[in-house]
C-alpha cells in the first residue's frame, strides 16, 4: 500500500511549530557570568565578582595604527567625539585636554602639599629651603629656566615632582599632538609604528554580551564612517578589553555552531536518505528530534528563566545523538511487522539504553558550573523527550502513515562481519594495554587553567594583551585585598601595611607595590601634613633667611607662600573629591566600593587593592599579608584551584551517575554476566579513549569529561543492543546495520565538530569521535555473541 | 597622562639657540641681497628676500652670549658658549660658562645635558608649544616662512643690510608662554646672518642672545 504522507507531515509540522514557538519566545541570555563556576572561598568569590563587575572589566581599549601620527591624532579626536555623543559609553578618553595645564595636572599641583610624600616638617626648615633655592638658581641659569620658573618657584621642595612620579606610575601612555599614543611606539624609533589610544568605559560589565556587542558595534560604525572605503587610508582599528573578548568568544562559537549544525544536519539527512531511501521516513525520524529540542528548551526556560546562548548552541549539537532513537526503532522493523511489535522486541534494550544515558548525564548537573548544569538539563530533557516521542508517538504515526518497513535483515551481512568478532582477544589485549599505559603515566593529566575553556581566537587575545600593556592596566598575578567600612578605614589600614611591604621589598620578595594609599593618603595623614606646614609668617621668615645673597626678589615666592597658606586650611581630600576623570580612573582599580550581599542594610563595604609587582616569592608575600589581616589572592593559583575543584566534582558526579546506571542495568538485565559484558565494553572504550588522549598530551578538562560522558552514553546503546540474547541472523543483521548507521552519524557529526575553528568545540568533537569509535569497537567485540554460538530461535 | 621622562613641565628651547655666524658660501651664485631686494619695496618684499637669503645657508657655527633678565631675580644671569646649526633641523647650543651644558635639537626631539649629567629628552611633537618656540629659531634659520606662519605672525622691518623680524604668537596656548620674539640680522653680501635674538616671555622675562661669528 502506498504510504500516506499526511499524518507524518502534519506531526512534523506540529513539532516544528511547537519548537519554533518555544525558541522564539525564549529569552536567549547572553550574560556570560553563568559560565563562571561557583566560588567556594572568599578569595575566589572576590575574583569572580571582579570579573563580573570590576571597573577594569568595563573598559574597552581602542588602538588606531597604520598611518602617519598626525592623521591618527585627527582620527582619534574625531572618533572620540563620535563615541562620546553615541551614548553607549559613560566615559571616552583620548588624552585631549592633557596639554600643559591640563585639568588633572592642575588639580594635582593645587593639592600637592596634601598629597605628596615630600611634605614633611624637615622639608620646610631654613636649611632645606636654602638648598632648594640654590638648586633653583642653578636651574634658572640653565636652558631649563622656563620650566623652573613656572613650577620651581612655586614649589621649591619639589612636592609636585614627587607626586607626579607616583601618579604616573607604570602608565606607558605618551602624548602627541594632544592625544594619547602608546609611549613605546612613537615614530622616530626604527621599526615602531605609532598607535593612538582611546579608552572607553561601557555602562554595564564586560560580561554582558548584548551591551558589549552594542558598544563594539558603535565603535566600528564610527570608525567606518570616518574612514570611507573609497580612500585607502590603511588605518587599522584594534580593540581590546573584556567586552571585546567575550563578544569574540561568543561570535566564534556561534559561527562555528551555526555552520556545523547546518552541515551536520545535511550529512545526517543524506546518510538517512541513503539508508532508508524514503523522504517520509526521514520526516518521521525528524519528529522526535525536533520535539526533543523544543521540550529541552522549554524545561530549561521554566527552571532557570531563560536559555543561555552557549548552552543552546552546545545542546543543539549534542542532540544529534537523539537521532539514534527513532533510527533504532525504524531500523529494527521486520518485513510486515507492525511497529508495536518491534517495540516489544527491542523494548528492553531501548529502555535500558535511554535510562542509563540519562543517569549518566545527570552528573553534569552537579559539576559546579551553572552553564554545564544547564547543558546537562538541556541534554537530559532533550534525549528523554526524543526517546519518549519515539516510543509513544512514532509507532502510531508509522502505522497511520502505513510506512513499509525497510527490511534490511540480510543475513549475508552478519555472515560477513561477525567473524571479525574472533578478534575479541585482540580487543582485550588493547584494553589491557590502554589501562597499563594510563597506570604507567599516572593517570590522565588534568587541565588547570581556564584557557583551555576559552574560545577566544588567539589573534584577539594577542591584540588585547598588547593594548593592555600599552595602557599600563594592572595585570597583577597576585593581589592583596583590604576591606573596611569606609574609604578612610581602608586607606589607614593600607598605610599601616607600609612597613610590611617595605620589608618585603627590602628582602627582594617583591619589586614594587601599588596601592590606593600611595596615590591618595588617608585624611589622617593629610591632616598631619597640614600641621607640618609652617604658618605664613614663619615661612616668610625662613624663606627670607634662605634666600639671602642669592638674588631672588621677594615676590618670586609669592605663589609658594600663598599655596602653603591655602593648603593649611584646605579640607582633606577623599576619593569622591577626585572628580577629574583621568585621576578617578587612575585610583578606581585600587579603591572601590561594593554593595553588601543581597543589598543588606548599612550599604556596602570599601575595598583596597594592593598590587605587588615583580613578585619573586609569592608564598612569603601571601604569608606576610595574611598575617597582617589582608585577604590574599594568587590569581593563577586560585584559577587553577577553581578548575581543579570543578573537574573533581564533575568526575565525582560522573562516577555516581555510573553507579546508578550500573544498578539500573542490573535490574533491567537481570544477569550479572550481561551486566559485566555491557559495563565492561563501555569501560574498555573509556579506557582506550583516555589512553589515546593522554598519549597525544591532551589535557583532560571539563570539556573532555562531558564529551566522554556522551561517548559512554552512545557506547551503552551499542553494547545493550549487541548484547541482546537469542537473536536470529536476520535480527542480528538489522541490529548491526542500524548501529553502524547510528555510529556513522555520530562519528560524522562530531568529526565535523572536530574541524571547528574554536579549540573548545574542536576538543569536544575529537573526544567524542575517539570515544564513540572505541565504543563501537568494544561493543561489537565484547558484547555480541561469537559466531556459531548464536541460536537461530526466533524470540517471540 | 603626559610624557614623564622630564619634569612635568616644558623646557623652553627657543631661548637657547641658533645662529649662523660666518659667511656661508652658497652653492651657485646667489644675487646680492641688495639686488634681490631692489624691485620690492616695503616689508613683504623684505621678508621674502630675507627668508630667501636665510634659506641658502647650509650650516654655520657661531659664538653666543646670553643675558637673561628674569622677573624672579634682582640681577640678570649671563652665559656664553657655542652654537652649531645644520640644515634642515639640527641645532646645538654648547654652554661653556658659567656651567657646562649641551642642548641638542634634532629631528623633533630635544635633549639637554647639564653639568655632564645624563641627557633628559623631550619629544617636541608631544609638547607642541615648546615645539613652537624651537620652530621660531629653526624656521628662521631655514628660511621656512610657511613653517613660521603656522605658529606666528611674522613681520619684517628695516633694510637688507639691517633687518628685524618680529614674531608674535598666533595661538592662545603659545601666547601664555611668549609675548614676542625679535630677530635682528643683516646681509653682508655673501649670506644672511643673525645678530641677535630677543625673547620676551609673557611673565615679563627677557632674554637676549647676542651672536658673533666663530673665530
Image (cartoon, coloured by chain):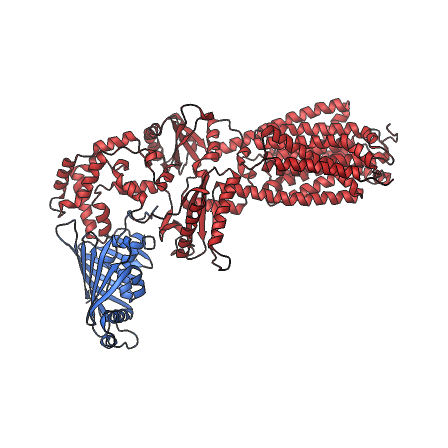
Chain colours: A red, B blue
Q: Quadrant of residue A615?
A: top left
Q: Is residue A321 something that shows in the picture?
A: no
Towards the viewer: A301 or A135: A301
Towards the viewer: B45 or A69: B45
Residue A297, position in %: x, y?
64, 33
Residue A426, position in %: x, y?
75, 36
Assign the N terminus of chain A to one quadrant of the image: top right
Q: Residue at x 17, y 34 (%)?
A: A535
Towards the viewer: A348 or A480: A348
Asked if residue A753 lies left or right of residue A613, the reply is right
Q: Quadrant of residue A485?
A: top left
> Which residue, as the protein is rendered here, is positioned at the far left?
A549
Assign the C terminus of chain A to one quadrant of the image: top right
Q: Is residue B210 something that shows in the picture?
A: yes
- Vertical placement of residue B199 versus A678, above or below: below
Q: Residue at x 57, y 44 (%)?
A: A252
The total number of labels drawn is 0
Asked if residue A441 lies left or right of residue A97, the reply is right
Residue A10, position in %: x, y?
76, 38
Asked if residue A724 lies left or right of residue B71, the reply is right
Towards the viewer: A338 or B55: A338
Asked if residue B2 lies left or right of residue A327, the reply is left
Residue A224, position in %: x, y?
49, 53
Amino acid at each position: 500500500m502506498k504510504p500516506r504522507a499526511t499524518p507524518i507531515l502534519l506531526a512534523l509540522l506540529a513539532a516544528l511549530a511547537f519548537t519554533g514557538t518555544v525558541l522564539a519566545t525564549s529569552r536567549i541570555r547572553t550574560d556570560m557570568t553563568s559560565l563562571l563556576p561557583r566560588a567556594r572561598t572568599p578569595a575566589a568569590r572576590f575574583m569572580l565578582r571582579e570579573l563580573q563587575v570590576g571597573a577594569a572589566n568595563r573598559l574597552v581599549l581602542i588602538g588606531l595604527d597604520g598611518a602617519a601620527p598626525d592623521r591618527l591624532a585627527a582620527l582619534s579626536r574625531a572618533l572620540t567625539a563620535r563615541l562620546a555623543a553615541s551614548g553607549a559609553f559613560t566615559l571616552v578618553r583620548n588624552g585631549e585636554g592633557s596639554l600643559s595645564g591640563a585639568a588633572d595636572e592642575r588639580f594635582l599641583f593645587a593639592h600637592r602639599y596634601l598629597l605628596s610624600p615630600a611634605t614633611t616638617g624637615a622639608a620646610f626648615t631654613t636649611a632645606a629651603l636654602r638648598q632648594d633655592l640654590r638648586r633653583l638658581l642653578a636651574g634658572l641659569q640653565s636652558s631649563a629656566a622656563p620650566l623652573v620658573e613656572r613650577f620651581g618657584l612655586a614649589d621649591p621642595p619639589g612636592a609636585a615632582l614627587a607626586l607626579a612620579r607616583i601618579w604616573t606610575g607604570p602608565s606607558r601612555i605618551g602624548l602627541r599632538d594632544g592625544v594619547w599614543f602608546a609611549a613605546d611606539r612613537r615614530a622616530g624609533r626604527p621599526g615602531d609604528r605609532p598607535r593612538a589610544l582611546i579608552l572607553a568605559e561601557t555602562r554595564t560589565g564586560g560580561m554582558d554580551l548584548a551591551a558589549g556587542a552594542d558598544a563594539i558595534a558603535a565603535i566600528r560604525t564610527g570608525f567606518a564612517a570616518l574612514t570611507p572605503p573609497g580612500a585607502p587610508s590603511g588605518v587599522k582599528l584594534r580593540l581590546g578589553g573584556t567586552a571585546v573578548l567575550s563578544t569574540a568568544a561568543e561570535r566564534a562559537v556561534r559561527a562555528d555552531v551555526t555552520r556545523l549544525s547546518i552541515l551536520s544536519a545535511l550529512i545526517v539527512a543524506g546518510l538517512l536518505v541513503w539508508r532508508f531511501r524514503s523522504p517520509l521516513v526521514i520526516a518521521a525520524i525528524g519528529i522526535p528530534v525536533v520535539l526533543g529540542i523544543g521540550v529541552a528548551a522549554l524545561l530549561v526556560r521554566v527552571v532557570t528563566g531563560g536559555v543561555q546562548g552557549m548552552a543552546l548552541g552546545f545542546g543543539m549539537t549534542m542532540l544529534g545523538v537523539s537521532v539514534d532513537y527513532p533510527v533504532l526503532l525504524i531500523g529494527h522493523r521486520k518485513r510486515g511487522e507492525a511497529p508495536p511489535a518491534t517495540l516489544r522486541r527491542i523494548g528492553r534494550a531501548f529502555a535500558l539504553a535511554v535510562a542509563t544515558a540519562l543517569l549518566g548525564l545527570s552528573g553534569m548537573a552537579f559539576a559546579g558550573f551553572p552553564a554545564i548544569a544547564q547543558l546537562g538539563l538541556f541534554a537530559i530533557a532533550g534525549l528523554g523527550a526524543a526517546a519518549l516521542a519515539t516510543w509513544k508517538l512514532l509507532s502510531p504515526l508509522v502505522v497511520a502513515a502505513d510506512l513499509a518497513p525497510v527490511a534490511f535483515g540480510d543475513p549475508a551481512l552478519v555472515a560477513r562481519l561477525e567473524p571479525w568478532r574472533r578478534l575479541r582477544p585482540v580487543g582485550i589485549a588493547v584494553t589491557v594495554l590502554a589501562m597499563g599505559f594510563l597506570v604507567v603515566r599516572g593517570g590522565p593529566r588534568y587541565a588547570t587553567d581556564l584557557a583551555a575553556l576559552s574560545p577566544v581566537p588567539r589573534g584577539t587575545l594577542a591584540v588585547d594583551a598588547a593594548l593592555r600593556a600599552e595602557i599600563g592596566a594592572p595585570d597583577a598575578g597576585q593581589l592583596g585585598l583590604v576591606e573596611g567600612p569606609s574609604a578612610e578605614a581602608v586607606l589607614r589600614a593600607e598605610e599601616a601595611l607600609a612597613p610590611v611591604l617595605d620589608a618585603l621589598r627590602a628582602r627582594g620578595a617583591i619589586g614594587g607595590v601599588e596601592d590606593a594609599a600611595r596615590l591618595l593618603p588617608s585624611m589622617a595623614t593629610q591632616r598631619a601634613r597640614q600641621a607640618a606646614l609652617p604658618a605664613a609668617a614663619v615661612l616668610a621668615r625662613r624663606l627670607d633667611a634662605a634666600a639671602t645673597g642669592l638674588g631672588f626678589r621677594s615676590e618670586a615666592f609669592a605663589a609658594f607662600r600663598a599655596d602653603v597658606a591655602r593648603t593649611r586650611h584646605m579640607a582633606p581630600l577623599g576619593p569622591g573629591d577626585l572628580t577629574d576623570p583621568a585621576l578617578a580612573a587612575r585610583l578606581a582599580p585600587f579603591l572601590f566600593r561594593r554593595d553588601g550581599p543581597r543589598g543588606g542594610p548599612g550599604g556596602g563595604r570599601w575595598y583596597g587593592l594592593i598590587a605587588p609587582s615583580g613578585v619573586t616569592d609569592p608564598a612569603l608575600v601571601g604569608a606576610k599579608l595574611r598575617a597582617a589581616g589582608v585577604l590574599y589572592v594568587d590569581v593563577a593559583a586560585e584559577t587553577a584551584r577553581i578548575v581543579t575543584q570543578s573537574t573533581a566534582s564533575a568526575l565525582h558526579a560522573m562516577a555516581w551517575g555510573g553507579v546508578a546506571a550500573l544498578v539500573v542495568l542490573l535490574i533491567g538485565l537481570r544477569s550479572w554476566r550481561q551486566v559485566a559484558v555491557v559495563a565492561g565494553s563501555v569501560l574498555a572504550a573509556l579506557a582506550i579513549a583516555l589512553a589515546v588522549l593522554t598519549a597525544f598530551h591532551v589535557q583532560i578538562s571539563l570539556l573532555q569529561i562531558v564529551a566522554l560522558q556522551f561517548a559512554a552514553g552512545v557506547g551503552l546503546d551499542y553494547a545493550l543492543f549487541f548484547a541482546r540474547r537469542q537473536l536470529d541472523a536476520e535480527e542480528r543483521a538489522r541490529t548491526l546495520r542500524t548501529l553502524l548507521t547510528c555510529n556513522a552519524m555520530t562519528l560524522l557529526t562530531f568529526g565535523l565538530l572536530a574541524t571547528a575553528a574554536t579549540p573548545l568545540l574542536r576538543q569536544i568533537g575529537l573526544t567524542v569521535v575517539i570515544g564513540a569509535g572505541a565504543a563501537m569497537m568494544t561493543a561489537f567485540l565484547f558484547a555480541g555473541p561469537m559466531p556459531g554460538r548464536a541460536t537461530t530461535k526466533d524470540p517471540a | 597622562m603626559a610624557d614623564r621622562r622630564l619634569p612635568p613641565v616644558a623646557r623652553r628651547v627657543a631661548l637657547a639657540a641658533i645662529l649662523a655666524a660666518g659667511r656661508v658660501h652658497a652653492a651657485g651664485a646667489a644675487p646680492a641681497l641688495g639686488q634681490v631686494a631692489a624691485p620690492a619695496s616695503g616689508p613683504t618684499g623684505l621678508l621674502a628676500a630675507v627668508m630667501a637669503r636665510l634659506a641658502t645657508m647650509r650650516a654655520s657655527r657661531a659664538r653666543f652670549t646670553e643675558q637673561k633678565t628674569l622677573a624672579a631675580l634682582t640681577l640678570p644671569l649671563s652665559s656664553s658658549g657655542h652654537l652649531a646649526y645644520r640644515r634642515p633641523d639640527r641645532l646645538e647650543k654648547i654652554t661653556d660658562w658659567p656651567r657646562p651644558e649641551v642642548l641638542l635639537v634634532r629631528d623633533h626631539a630635544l635633549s639637554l645635558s647639564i653639568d655632564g649629567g645624563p641627557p633628559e629628552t623631550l619629544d617636541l611633537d608631544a609638547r607642541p608649544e615648546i615645539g613652537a618656540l624651537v620652530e621660531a629659531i629653526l624656521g628662521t634659520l631655514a628660511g621656512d616662512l610657511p613653517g613660521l606662519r603656522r605658529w606666528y605672525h611674522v613681520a619684517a622691518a628695516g633694510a637688507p643690510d639691517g633687518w628685524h623680524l618680529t614674531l608674535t604668537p598666533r595661538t592662545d596656548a603659545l601666547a601664555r608662554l611668549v609675548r614676542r620674539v625679535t630677530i635682528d640680522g643683516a646681509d653682508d653680501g655673501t649670506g644672511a646672518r643673525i645678530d641677535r635674538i630677543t625673547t620676551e616671555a609673557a611673565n615679563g622675562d627677557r632674554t637676549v642672545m647676542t651672536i658673533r661669528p666663530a673665530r
